[in-house]
Image (cartoon, rainbow, N blue to C red):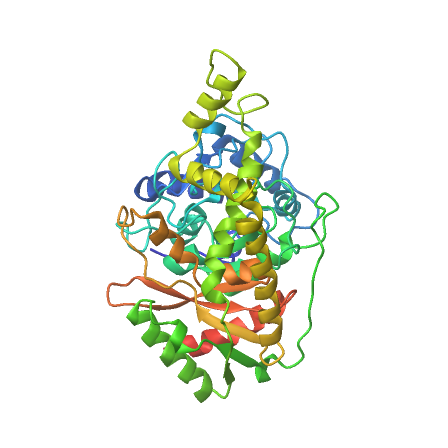
Amino acid sequence: MMMKGIDYFRKLYRSEKVRDVIAGVLDFVDSEDKKYNAFITINRDETLRRAEELDNKKNARGKLFGIPVAVKDNIAVKGVRLTCASRILGNYVSPYSATVVEKLLAEDAIIIGKTNLDEFAMGSSTEYSAYFPTRNPIAPDYVPGGSSGGSAAAVAAGMVPLALGSDTGGSVRQPASFTGTVGLKPTYGNVSRYGLVAFASSLDVIGPLASNLEDAELLYRVISGKDPSDSTSVCHSRSLEEVDRCTIGILDEKWLTTINPAILDAYRRLTADLERAGMKTRIIQTDLWKYALNAYYIITSSEASSNLARYDGVRYGARQEGENLLDMYFSTRTGGFGDEVKRRIFLGTFALSAGYYDKYYKKANVLRELLRREFKENFQGVDFILTPTAPELPFKLGEKVNPIDMYMSDWFTAPASLAGYPAISLPWYRNEQNLPVGIHIIGQAGDEENIFILSKKLNKIISHF
């Protein structure tokens, strides 16, 4: 299995028509995706029409001319189903495209289809889809991570060189780790959320998945930027003059006792390799990280319970009739939402209810602010923070039945999400069973370009790992 990058397609276009290349891609997806279930919707006719349009283009080619891209099915593409992998939106067709999709099209990209996810992006394995679980192309009996598992699997299987995912607490980075791909969670506000179906609005971010750093960087540059359609769009940027002389923050091993022993051993060896390569490292304070997951799940569930109230069977989406309005609400939401979505709605509604708001939701937001302060204090002494992406190796389909065990997948990724900071997962190493493991770099607000520079340097060290 070969992960094809952008350069592969650019070479093809020197001698072949876009339509012929894309027809071949669609045929490959048709055959390959039977093994992995990465896609929910393939828009073959529109895709070929778009390819013919590019063949007839007379003016300058865009940065992504003819490049096939997959889009997570919680991001709007005009005229295409937008399901969020949920029965409640099973037949909903989006009347508009997300800003990120418009930016892709403006650079002559081709949207191949919409990828599978955990329902409404709530999960870490892509097993919570209402349609089917997605399999990991590296090891098909294993999960690809979640919730952007379909996008990660599409890239890892070589079906597309680029994909968009969304990341609320690790949903781009953890699948990247599990599939041996590159996944970036941008700074909150640096990529427009307009057209992204809301899970937890104060944390949701759209990010790129790719087979290599250069492609991920290009895709990020295309989709980033201030958007007047998104009131949270800000455009952070930070310049770091001497990335080669930066100091890397590493974790005290007292916080790593519960992670997979193979990952801990690899983390020790990598930090030693960094020092041998002349990079400075420093142990950071992470006293509040052990509370981050608790705060994360209270905040996200609370926001989800509010955001998902709009799916009531009245305005759009599926409807199950009842004897009266209240009965219709009850039957629609009971039948339309899966168990994990219901679980988080219940948790969020409880945390926001009278008598419990101060005890749970308010305290979680206080912790969030304290965590931001801890990050800022750490960043006074280090330039970046390096952690494993996930505390575990990819796990088998059906292996995790306890939701709490699934929630622990976000142990290293949720803190940066709560703080709003950018972070990337890079392919790091593979264990004896060839299962991928990712390394995770957290930067300061607006640090995306610096993260890519450091990642390229880190890649040279990892290549000798």
> Is 11 in front, or is 391?
391
Q: Is residue 375 above or below residue 51?
A: below
Does the image show residue 204?
no
Please tell me which residue is depicted at 46% across the width and 35% down the height of the picture: 42
**In the orientation shown, which residue stands out farthest toward the right?**
228
Please tell me which residue is depicted at 61% across the width and 37% down the height of the picture: 53
Left or right placement of residue 151 versus residue 66 in this view: left
Left or right placement of residue 462 versus residue 233 in this view: left
**In the orientation shown, which residue stands out farthest toward the front?**
355
**In the orientation shown, which residue stands out farthest toward the top?**
323
* Residue 216 figure quarter: bottom right
Residue 454 spot, x, y in % from top left: 55, 74
Left or right placement of residue 430 versus residue 55 in this view: left
Q: Is residue 176 above or below residue 85?
A: below
Residue 80 spot, x, y in % from top left: 54, 31
> Is 70 in front, or is 448?
448
